[in-house]
Image (cartoon, rainbow, N blue to C red):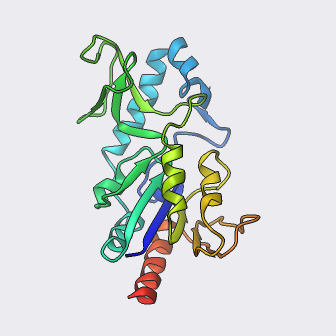
Amino acid sequence: MKKVVVLTGAGMSAESGVSTFRDSNGLWCNHRIEEVASPIAWENNQQLVLDFYNQRRKQLFEVDPNDGHKWLVKLEEKFDVQIVTQNVDDLHERAGSTNVLHLHGELKKVRSTIDPNLIYTLNHWELKKGDNCELGSQLRPHIVWFGESVPMIKTAMSIVSGADILIVIGTSMVVYPAASLINFVGDSIPKYYIDPTAFQVEGISNLQIISEKAGTGVPKLVSQLLNQYY
């Protein structure tokens, strides 16, 4: 069974109505994103950070997977599919995908501020001051913030390097370290890039551009791969 590795970014979930909560100036409620999504932000204004992620989490409870998510599940019927996502939503899992690695954390999870191994899943959208872990420490969003390392990046590199087919969906390919993952795939491996603004990536061979949104581009590619290999 061929191994298909899928890299997904914000465009994957955009059609489900997931907002980045950023306006055209990169601001959220007149705050720079670093002021609500960084360790310094947490130290300076914990309530603002909690409010930011509570709003994102609340929205996530109101949206559903789109056709892009659902057709990746169809791909699992015939291929060994591993998804590596930059997204913090759970739409891949809710659609039915069984192998999902979150590079930047998960919005519906929170963790202890003194023991990062104490991770909990929320069944509601609001995290408040005074919501503590079992050790008595304030819980924080289980998110990789600006200025923090990406602990799953080495695992992602290993996954990508073993791909027989690589699919990149809904990402600008300019956010690092995630954007570097395509470099770990061999030259002979077929690669597909689905995004309305997709472009030929310098130095990457065997790359086919599909200039469409995930909701239309993914079903087309999945149908093509199923016909081609089965």
Determine the residue positioned at 61% across, 28% down: 147
Q: Name the residue at 43% across, 58% down.
A: 83
The structure residue drawn at horizontal position 50% and vertical position 63%, both measured from the top left corner, is 162
Residue 60, above or below 163? above
Instruction: Find residue 96 and report its horizontal and vertical position in percent.
Output: 28, 61
Which one is nearer the viewer's eye here, 29 or 107? 107
Figure check: 181 above or below 59: below
Q: In this view, does 134 lie above or below 162?
A: above
Picture quarter with the C terminus: bottom left
Q: Looking at the image, how many numbered discs can be counted on the residues?
A: 0
Residue 32 can be seen in this image: no
Picture residue at 61% right of the left edge, 72% below the top: 211
Q: Does residue 91 appear left or right of residue 25 in this picture?
A: left
- x and y, in percent, of residue 218 in the image: 46, 72
In this orientation, which residue lies closer to the viewer: 38 or 32?
Answer: 38
Residue 18: x and y in percent read: 44, 49
